[in-house]
Image (spheres, rainbow, N blue to C red):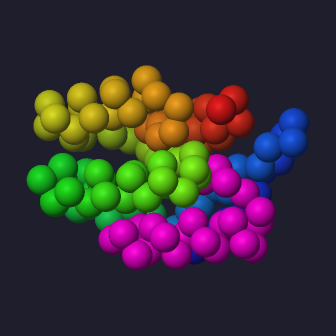
Amino acid sequence: MNIELICRGGAAVAVVTADEPVLTDVQSALDLMAQVQFEHQASRIAIAKSAVAEDFFILSTRLAGEVLQKFVNYRVKFAIFGDFSRYTSKPLRDFIRESNAGWDVFFAATREEAVERLLRV
């Protein structure tokens, strides 16, 4: 796992990339939040889709809801960036659209878009 810190205008975004999933369950999400907050003093996280378990994108597993609830509860802004075009599930597409309309969780096509959205909130 690689964590790069991007600072601008007094805000910091931790960009997380990995070759294999590091966000696999609720505990790994909590561990990631803690690591980013304590080691990098950031409360905004952008993570590559490749670093997120595939079960996250299957809404019936409830992983996405449980993980995102933790980010909201701990007031950590969160974005996942990558190509979501292969997902055809209407509930997932609606979930992504509704998340992007809010202030806490975002899905972005590119790393740059994810960082920019997080820096604005």
Question: In percent of the image, x 70 and y 50: which residue is there?
Answer: 13
Query: Where 13 sits versus 37, above or below?
Result: above
Side of 116 relative to 78 (left or right): right
Question: In percent of the image, x 58 and y 52: which residue is there?
Answer: 76
- Image position, residue 20 (x, y; %): 42, 72
Find the residue positioned furthest to the top: 101
Q: Nearer the viewer, residue 55 or 63?
A: 63
Quick check: is 100 in the magenta stretch? no
Quick check: is 29 in the magenta stretch? yes
- Image position, residue 92 (x, y; %): 22, 38
Q: Is residue 88 visible?
A: no
Side of 69 relative to 92 (left or right): right
- Image position, residue 17 (x, y; %): 56, 62
Side of 104 relative to 20 (left or right): right
Q: Which residues are magenta?
A: 22-47
Side of 1 relative to 40 (left or right): left
Question: In percent of the image, x 48 and y 53: which residue is there?
Answer: 73
Find the residue positioned furthest to the front: 73
Question: In percent of the image, x 64 and y 50: which residue is there?
Answer: 44
